Image (cartoon, rainbow, N blue to C red):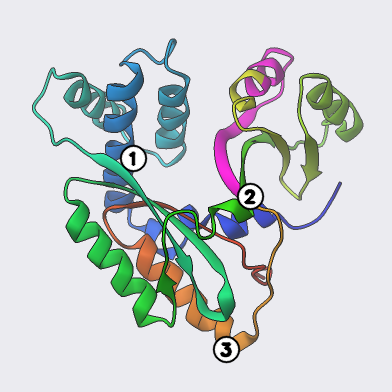
Amino acid sequence: MSGHSKWHNIQARKGKSDAQKGKIFTKIGREIAVIVKQGGADPQSNPKLRDVIAKAKQNNMPNDSIERSIKKASGELSGVNYESCTYEGYGTGGSAVIVECLTDNKNRTAGDVRHAFDKFGGSLGATGCVSYLFQRKGIVEVEKTENTDSDELMMTALDAGAVDVMEYDDYFEIITEANAHNNISEKLSRVGYTVLNAETTLVPDNFVTLDEEKITKFNRMIETLEDLDDVQEVYHNVNLPEEE
């Protein structure tokens, strides 16, 4: 039940470019806008909105910025309409990459994403070319303290419907089915565990290993994609070396 989290490797949302808080807030604001229009402005009845508000707070987004984004999406304030779009392609070494975007100009976004792939030896593919290699799963991260009984947590999580539990230095990572993470995180919170994060992610069925030269080129492509304003999430199936 111990080891290094591969999910954080394949979901690049916490990469170097996200160190710029303004860019983080812009991306989260767009996500809020789309989710509110899809499911309403009440977090109690819109679990996806609850998720993104939790992510906003985790990234220290001010409450007034969160509320302003919700009001814009619900029509109380004027705002831009964003559309979701997903691009699939291949990175160096035949690696699989999925890029999820929110944009007000699909032509601009497609050109920017294609350029990032081409620049670093990748190629943009047709819809469905790599998505079959991934499964959508839920992830719940629980704080680890000196009083946490790992066996008890694992049994509680599995009884609540979790698929697997992984233990790391500072937290536990609970894998769930795609739509079960909210329910499981709420159950764990009710019995006293501190939930740090709950979200859905794309998990590859298998990982590929690249040599050092290809890894460097691949990371530059991922960082370029992450740095695009329209890009929300980048997923891939490369087994990145553990950071020291």
Taking the view exactly as shown, the residue that stands out farthest to the bottom is 213
Q: Is residue 102 magenta?
A: no
Q: Position of residue 199 (x, y in %)?
A: 55, 35
Q: Position of residue 125 (x, y in %)?
A: 42, 65
Residue at 27%, 39% in the rendered image? 30
Q: Is residue 199 left or right of residue 109?
A: right
| Sequence-earlier tag: 2 or 3 | 2
Q: Eyeballing the image, is 150 above or below 1?
A: above
Which mark is on residue 28?
Answer: 1
Q: Which residue is mark 2?
A: 203
Residue at 80%, 56% in the rendered image? 3
Residue at 17%, 45% in the rendered image? 104
**Quick check: marks 1 and 3 in contact, CB under 8 Å?**
no
Q: Eyeballing the image, is 126 above or below 23?
A: below
Q: Amino acid at mark 2?
A: Val
Q: Which residue is mark 3?
A: 213
Give the quarter of the image for residue 63: top left
| Sequence-earlier tag: 1 or 3 | 1
Residue at 17%, 26% in the rendered image? 72
Q: Is residue 205 left or right of residue 71?
A: right
For mark 1, give the secondary structure: helix
Q: Is residue 127 left or right of residue 104?
A: right
| Sequence-earlier tag: 1 or 2 | 1
Residue 233 visible? The answer is yes
Q: CA distance from mark 1 to mark 2?
A: 21 Å
Q: Is residue 196 magenta?
A: yes
Q: Amino acid at mark 1?
A: Ile
Quadrant in which the C terminus is drawn: bottom right
Q: Eyeballing the image, is 22 above or below 171?
A: below
